[in-house]
Image (spheres, helix red, strand yellow):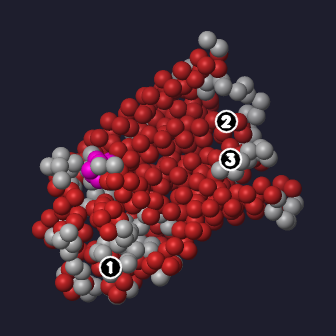
Amino acid sequence: MTLPARNQIVCAGLMAVPLAVLIGHSLYFNFVCDDAFIFFRYADNLLRYGELSFNPGQRVEGYTSFLWTVLIAAGMALGSEPIIWSLGLGLICGCATLVVVQRLGTVLDGLVEPGQPRGAIRLWRFVAPALLSVTPAFACWTSGGLETALFTLLVTAAFWRYWAESGKPSAVPWSGLLFGLACLTRPEGFLFFGLTLLHRLVDQGLRCSRRRPARRDWIWLALFLLPVLPHQLWRISYYGQVLPNTYYARVAGLEHEGRGLLYLQMFVRHYGLWIILLLLVVPRAQPGGRRVTSFYTHLATLVLVVMVYVAGVGGDFMALHRFFVPVIPLLALVLADELRNLHALAVPSVPGTGPVFWLCTPLRRFSLQESCCIAHHCRVAAWKPAVPRGWTRSAISSGSPSRTPPSVVGWLNTRTRTLGSRPPLPGRFPSTAACGLTTCTA
């Protein structure tokens, strides 16, 4: 067996540990959020009536993620229960994100030490996946039945491919396609792409003083538009709107003042040290020179702008920082790199202690007790997959308030165009009859 093949086996064994931890951590939460049933209803109507609508005949884009809805519909078409299918997809996306973060660490090592041998095992590359596997927010929203895990995977993979393609003129810029798929998953994908486009323009201007885009840049943009442009044209022709109706309902019907800052404050309280390390690493001189500084500048811009954006739109009512989960893998990479630097300063004469050093460092504000309490709340309050077969499909089709979670009934105003732009009275939700909603009896 050759050395590279043996190293690949060792790397696979090392990655199996955080993957197993994440699977167990996610199954510890093991819940389906009530908002997931909105996706299930749209997917069910797509299969039954060929309409991507909450109620047949009413073309309203009341879902946030087109790609997640299509994936749910694909699973239902194959005969899978949507609850089990959505949980399985989320778990697969979470595990894939760990692998992508490990590969991103490899890219960072290549920027810091360009001359290192290809295929060499660097144990520090596995610290960031290990950190993610024990992070309650990441593990929680790997479950839940929502598109959070898929969106996190796509934006992390796009960031990885963007920097893996950097400095390789012959590489196909697949990061553009990944950013495009992220835009089909959540509207925030456009924010990630726009910031990356800005970084690309500034970086090229500083590096080679070239004002006109190269052929490779046009290919990157074309791959981004490949899924985005047809979907946007279809959205305008089918729904008659540029953005999902959920956006208009959120902007028109929610009070953002103070709530977004509170949401941001909770995130900073639990992950403040991670953010502080990010702010300290950017202005510091890096061993890899300008490219490493550019890497961290790009990463910090994504994280900080997303934090400001989430606070600006009012955050989220759900626990464990769902809207911040897409940037947690990037923060975990920064924390792992800083732990490596700290280890080099603290114990330079003890080789081989790096893989366990971070386990002894009290860096986490989120305790296991808090994670257990939230997981218990998820199991008590959320819908479990252990339900009789066929119950999910009938509940989705009937739309009966007695079989629908209260928050779904409360947010039915986002499924109608008139109520989406007209907020309900404070502290009161309109009934389904007031919304003009009808139930499906077929």
Query: Residue at coordinates 20% horizontally, 50% vertically from top-left?
Result: 384
Residue 109: assigned label: 2
- Label 2 Cα crowd, 10 Å radius (few <14 / some 14-19 / many 20+): some
Q: CA distance from mark 2 to mark 3?
A: 12 Å
Residue occupied by mark 1: 57
Residue 201 figure quarter = bottom right
Pointers 2 and 3 in contact (C-beta within 8 Å): no
Q: Is residue 339 visible from the viewing direction of this image? A: no
Q: Can you say which quadrant of the picture contains the C terminus?
A: bottom left
Say whether residue 72 is left or right of residue 123: left
Instruction: Tell me which numbered mark, 3 or 1, is placed earlier along the sequence.
Output: 1
Circle 3 — which element? helix
User: Which quadrant holds the N terminus?
Assistant: top right
Q: 167 left or right of 354?
A: right
| Residue 430 in magenta stretch | no
Residue 11 spot, x, y in % from top left: 54, 25
Whole-number angstrom distance, CA of label 3 to CA of label 1? 45 Å
Residue type, label 1: Gly
Residue 194: percent from left, percent from top: 63, 65
The residue identified by callout 3 is 163
Q: Which residues are magenta?
A: 80-87
* Residue farthest to the left, as pictured: 402
* Dots 2, 1 in contact, CB < 8 A: no
